[in-house]
């Protein structure tokens, strides 16, 4: 346990920070770089625990991955060069590693067992296992293959047409990656688009893939070509500082190098709808992903309703958006976010617990929450629930509380943002 005591900030935040690499894109760069024959160089890789799980999984399957800080050099003999791991694969806390790797392991000619930590062992895998079984996968585990540990015996896969029953980029990605190894074509349809980094990167690596934004089709058995990847800054990490800049009086911050892929920018839309003073500068496109700098300043905010198509575009930002809403005048309603219940923890319960401990007026609903603002936050003892996004939300709240905040365990922050407190300090 690594407890952290945070005293309220008695000054504004100012200055600029470079946001570390995107977690979702970092995972995918290692996966596709390892499936492609040749050398893939990755720049600005996220050196967080989750992404290192994906690196180690491919090292265990015979891929050479050299790491120098946030740069990777991946040297692979391609899909046919992958070898059976000598041990069971430990995916730690990483849902993305687990679900995307299931799609790949299902189509490789050897058996593997995968497991994870206590949180990951409670997360539902049948959302991936069921469609993979339709493709011919052999996957076994508790609760009919819903829970880790799972054993996967690679088999010949066939393409399917699948409509996602849940709003999940991980499920979409697992099926597309299995589709890459399968006979014929595989199509995935989603009613509400989720993050499209897998599709973008598959295209950059030369896969035969098309998408109209709702249905994506990939042709199997198409060899990928090694391609260099630049990883933009993670907007989900930037979100903590966007909210900090908007709620700490007199603050003005610039966040450099933030990924602005439309499937991820819901937090920017929310800040603008709430009336925040936000400016995007230096926009450019690198490797199919938009990138830019975001300047955020303190100012008055108003409550809004957040629901429908925007939800997958900000799903991981909801804990910190809830904090933002405590500082907005009026009511903020968050709906259609039932997926929060099956993240690293039940994030609806965790957010309500932390924010009510701090004196906020927040009520849970089945698929979201209702927040009444504006409230003065008191501070107190916060449980991180071993969830990086809950711990960072509590740390940002401490900037405006009246009394100190004690977070029971901040070690989980290294999952996605190992330099979080260093960056925060540089702005104070
Ligand atoms: O990897 P993990 O643990 O699932 O990470 C989280 C997070 O908050 O970092 C969710 F807990 O992000 C997911 C995100 O919620 C990362 C992700 C991806 O890279 O494809 C997609 C989203 O999950 P899902 O279930 O909607 O597909």
Image: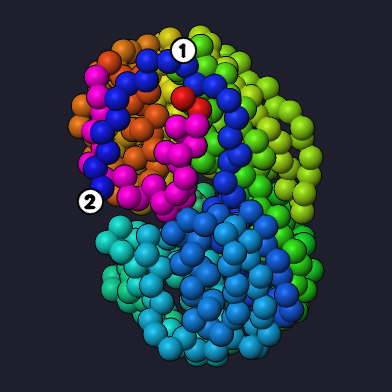
Above or below, comparing residue 63 to residue 346 in the picture: below
Q: Tell which of 419 and 313 is nearer to you.
A: 419
Q: Say if mark 1 contacts mark 2, CB within 8 Å.
A: no
Residue 293, quarter of the rendered image: top right
What secondary structure is marked by label 1?
Answer: loop
State which tag comes first along the sequence, 1 or 2: 2
Identified at 46% across, 12% down, the residue is: 249
**Label disc, if present, on residue 1 of the rendered structure:** 2
> Would you say residue 418 sits in the magenta stretch?
yes
Binning the other alpha carbons within 10 Å of mark 1 as few (below 14), some (14 to 19) or many (20 upward) gives some
Q: Residue 363 at what x, y percent from top left?
A: 29, 25
Numbered circles on residues, count: 2
Q: Which mark is residue 249?
A: 1
Q: Nearer the viewer, residue 106 or 205?
A: 205
Q: Which residues are magenta?
A: 403-426
Q: Is residue 124 left or right of residue 36?
A: left
Tell me the SS state at disc 2. loop
């Amino acid at each position: 346990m690594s407890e952290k005591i945070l005293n309220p900030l008695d000054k504004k935040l100012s200055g600029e920070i470079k946001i570390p690499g995107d977690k979702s894109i970092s995972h995918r760069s290692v996966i596709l770089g390892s499936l492609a024959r040749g050398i893939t160089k990755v720049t600005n890789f996220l050196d967080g625990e989750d992404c290192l799980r994906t690196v180690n999984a491919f090292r265990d399957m015979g891929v050479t991955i050299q790491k120098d800080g946030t740069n990777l050099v991946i040297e692979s003999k391609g899909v046919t060069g992958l070898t059976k791991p000598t041990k069971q694969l430990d995916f730690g806390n990483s849902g993305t590693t687990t679900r995307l790797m299931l799609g790949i392991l299902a189509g490789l000619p050897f058996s593997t067992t995968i497991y994870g930590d206590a949180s990951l062992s409670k997360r539902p895998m049948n959302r991936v296992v069921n469609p993979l079984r339709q493709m011919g996968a052999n996957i076994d585990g508790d609760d009919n293959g819903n829970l880790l540990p799972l054993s996967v015996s690679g088999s010949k896969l066939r393409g399917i047409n699948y409509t996602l029953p849940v709003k999940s980029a991980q499920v979409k990605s697992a099926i597309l990656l299995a589709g890459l190894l399968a006979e014929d074509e595989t199509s995935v349809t989603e009613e509400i688009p989720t993050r499209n980094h897998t599709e973008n990167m598959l295209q950059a690596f030369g896969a035969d893939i098309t998408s109209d934004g709702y249905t994506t089709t990939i042709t199997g058995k198409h060899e990928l070509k090694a391609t260099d990847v630049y990883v933009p800054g993670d907007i989900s990490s930037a979100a903590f500082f966007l909210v900090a800049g908007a709620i700490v009086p007199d603050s003005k911050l610039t966040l450099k190098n933030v990924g602005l892929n439309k499937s991820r920018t819901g937090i920017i839309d929310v800040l603008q709808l709430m009336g925040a003073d936000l400016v995007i500068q230096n926009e450019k496109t690198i490797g199919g992903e938009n990138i830019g700098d975001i300047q955020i300043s303190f100012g008055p905010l108003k409550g809004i309703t957040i629901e429908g198509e925007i939800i997958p575009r900000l799903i991981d930002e909801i804990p910190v958006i809830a904090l933002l809403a405590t500082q907005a005048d009026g009511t903020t309603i968050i709906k259609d976010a039932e997926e929060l219940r099956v993240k690293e923890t039940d994030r609806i319960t965790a957010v309500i617990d932390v924010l009510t401990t701090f004196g906020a007026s927040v009520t849970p609903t089945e698929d979201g929450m209702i927040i009444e603002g504006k409230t003065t936050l008191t501070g107190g003892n916060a449980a991180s629930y071993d969830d990086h996004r809950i711990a960072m939300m509590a740390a940002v709240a401490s900037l405006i509380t009246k009394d100190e905040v004690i977070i029971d365990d901040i070690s989980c922050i290294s999952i996605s943002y190992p330099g979080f407190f260093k960056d925060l300090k540089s702005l104070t």
